[in-house]
Image (tube, rainbow, N blue to C red):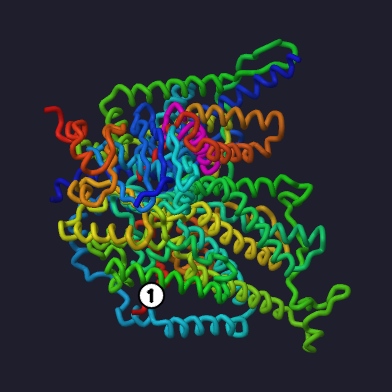
Amino acid sequence: MTSTTPLLEVSGLTMRFGGLLAVDGVALNVFPQQIVSMIGPNGAGKTTVFNCLTGFYKPSDGKIIFRGEEIQGLPGFKVARKGMIRTFQHVRLFKEMTVLENLLIAQHQSMNTNMLAGLFKTPSYRRSEKEAMDRAAYWLERVDLKEFANRKANTLAYGQQRRLEIARCMVTQPSLLMLDEPAAGLNPRETEDLKVLIAELRQNHDLTILLIEHDMKLVMSISDHIVVINQGCPLAQGTPEQVRQNPDVIKAYLGET
Amino acid sequence: MMIQNLKPAVISAVVVVVLTGLLMGVRLEQLGTGLTVTGAGPDVYWKIAAAAAFMFFFNLFRDHLSALWKALPGMPKTPTTLSDAAEKPLVRRLFWCFLIAAALIWPFMANRGGTDLATLVLIYIMLGLGLNIVVGLAGLLDLGYVGFYAVGAYSYALLAMYFGVGFWTGLIAAGCMAALFGFLLGFPVLRLRGDYLAIVTLGFGEIIRILLNNMTWLTNGPNGIGGIPKPTLFGLEFSRRASEGMQSFHDFVGISYDSSHRVIFLYLLALLLVLITLFVINRLLRMPIGRAWEALREDEIACRSLGINPTAIKLNAFTIGATFAGFAGCFFAARQGFISPESFTFIESAIILAIVVLGGMGSQVGVILAAIIMTVLPEMAREFNEYRMLLFGLMMVLMMIWRPQGLLPMKRPHMELRT
Amino acid sequence: MPESLFYFIQQLLNGLTVGSTYALIAIGYTMVYGIIGMINFAHGEVYMIGSYIAFTAIAALALFGIEFLPLLIIGAFIVSMIVTSAYGYSIERVAYRPLRGGNRLIPLISAIGMSIFLQNLVRLAQGSRDIAMPTLITGGVSIGPEDAFNANLSYMQMIIFAVTLITMTLLTLFITRSRMGRACRACAEDLKMTNLLGINTNGIIALTFVIGAALAAVAGVLLGMYYGVINPYIGFMAGLKAFTAAVLGGIGSIPGAVLGGLLLGVTEAMTAGYFSSEYKDVVAFSLLILVLLFRPSGILGRPEVEKV
């Protein structure tokens, strides 16, 4: 399943906030169609790594190579346009807009945004509008939200909002999906559904997934590769089995015994 | 309950006296080269006393009052059937048709003054609609909007003065110039946070006015530019005697000259410009860009994570808004025939902003309604004029407290998925 | 050669004089911004009202036969600070407190409304014409040769420097040493948390508006006496300038406001002295735009880290 060139290659990633070293020399490789998890205790700097990768923070040092291109220091929207799309730890939907419109916004970049075309409703404009609607409808079907398409996003239940956020990422047709604690706040049943969804996305949509997660059962069962971070530093990485048996990881999680 | 309210009640009464006592109760008078003070007269003292007493009793009985307020039946809401009906596209269309028809008939029903006033209202509607794109839709507080209005007006006036450019070419040029200024200013400043943007645009508006005032060699400074040519209809002039090589309207149609023709023509022209503005904004709202504006107001970070460039989207709104101000400015210059930096002070920006705020940010019917209220009211009650700006200010504060969404809050047309 | 040197010194002195009053007004913006993250748009009008009250107080005291100069000036300061404090407090209560916690544009618009309201209130009560006061403090010391062109440091300028310095010192002591000052700093750090710890944050917010207003009054008294002429419209420009100063120095930082004020004052005086006084406002605003472009956090401000 793994090919030789990684899709995402991170080396020596460092992030300083004033005197605080939040991330220190993190390195990781994500190969196409892999599911890679990043784990670590609270405050280990996992979300900061995410923010650096997706261009929300400008890393102080280090290299990020995505599909053979250096992307460190690029603004977030440019990183996103290269096909690296993320979700947030706390769901960030456009709450006052409908479910459907959330998905249309995500396609802004691929839609025909020519002013004049839009003013006069040219055929090419109509076509791009229809394509966007169709794609949105497809993904709503996939995440089981089609019946809610015309409801405001903030009227959805929490689990549904999480699914909508994933669908919103998928309509942009990303090559790397980054999920920040996707199972947080979900019940066991929903977590199980999420697991199925993630596996399916990788299988059928040529998708690579990088996720942060605290639910060890989920992480161990779906990951191909796990990266452990502690206090901003890389602690260990390897297959779920290797990580599970690593004494450093056990120490970091259970404390000095 | 009243005892514990006694202290705040006394304090508020004292505060009122401190606020007004010296500032309003005493008048500064110039006495030769010296300065002296005189009392403002018993009526002012009575007013101050009344205000203090009002605050005292208001705070004393505020618990009772709020209980009373709650006991009152709620604000009369629009009946649901009515608001449902307003949702229906057919009803909306009928409403707009009716409105446009009424606007078309108006100049033939009203007298010359009425038509003139209506033209002024239309200019403010156009400005309000333009600023509404920036403030209401894109959520960017632009306090220097009048700067773009000035750019539009002066573009046409200068082109006409130096190169003899006609109205229609001037209109395009004014729109382009204002758009260019909007783009150039927006490019650096739109990355800033909302309140910084407000101040920078305010500074920009002032810079434009100061430059117009001081670049005397180009703009004639405070004396302004006069003799700006009036608009023509396909080359037909609306004057008693056509200038050389031109034909006048009344000759062409074969009727006798009447100066009200021009007034009506100007009115209809303004109406046309407003309708174009309305059409463009309505289309924009249904386009991806309109959605992106709303999304950006809601969550900029989420927008960026989806590959949307916030600066580009904001710049779009800023430039489009500036363009409409440019058109309005050009029309204003042509209608007045004379412009000077006087017409483009911050107060003008504040009035346009007040129209947007009063109408309901983002709402087009609201802007139209507010522009009518703001322009016609001061005309109706001339003696009111003295207090006009005072009431403007008061209204802005009270609107924000009582109904920040405005008289007629916006509802953006949402796309629906048919299943 | 020395002539141009003394000309330069003169411009520098004039710039520092105006700059220190900008700094006093700018502190009001910076303190309010530091705590609630909003611009008090009506702050310039408070300064204007401060000038009016000072003129009224001086004229009234003179009417009662008090001619002793220090007493007149101190009286003007006290009365003016009391009245503007009431204005600062009322502005917070009316235009900010009911609107806290919503869309940030809403309190800004209500403050613009407040600013227009206050300006016109003064216009209606006192008339829109200029009001001039005879110079109370005359004379000064000259720097440079007695018989040739020299720079002049007037006593009024000295008073402005001294009062500014004293006020700043008192404010710094208050912020760093007193219990209230500590509460202010805590509010600037985290308003919600401070509230949870049992501190009356509403009171602290009101206090910052009051302190800012009192400082604006100090500036109003000083500048009013320095220029000798006031009208209801001076607040708008002064507010804009002081805001520029606050941003220049780094909004939220008190030393930044002082630095920004002085810098802006000197820039303006130099523009007026060497170029043209008509363009000094243009230069000031261009400076604002440039600073926001290249260093949005200002000279001494901390760059903000966005919370994702």
**At x 61% / y 53%, what residue is drawn?**
B183
**At x 44% / y 81%, what residue is drawn?**
B92
| Residue C211 placement (x, y as % from top left) | 37, 33
Residue C249 inside the magenta-drawn segment: yes
- Let me know if residue B335 appears in the view: yes
Q: Is residue A127 above or below residue C274?
A: below
Residue nearest the viewer, comparing C156 with A188: A188
As drawn, which residue projects farthest toward the left? A257
- Let me know if residue C63 appears in the view: no
Main secondary structure found in the magenta portion = helix
In the displayed structure image, the side of residue C205 where residue B116 appears, left or right:
right
Local SS, label 1: loop
In the displayed structure image, the side of residue C265 where residue C174 appears, left or right:
left
* Amino acid beneath label 1: Glu
Q: Is residue C23 above or below residue A201?
A: above
| Residue A181 placement (x, y as % from top left) | 26, 49
Q: Is residue A123 above or below residue A103?
A: below
Residue nearest the viewer, comparing C125 with B277: B277
Q: Quadrant of the C terminus of chain A?
A: top left
As drawn, which residue projects farthest toward the right? B244
Mark 1 highlights which residue? B416
Where does the magenta region start and end? C235-256
Residue C124 inside the magenta-drawn segment: no
**At x 44% / y 30%, what residue is drawn?**
C76
Residue nearest the viewer, comparing B212 with B133: B133
| Residue B403 placement (x, y as % from top left) | 35, 62
As drawn, which residue projects farthest toward the bottom? B254
Q: Is residue B255 above or below residue A6?
A: below
| Residue C119 placement (x, y as % from top left) | 49, 48
Q: Number of callouts in the render?
A: 1
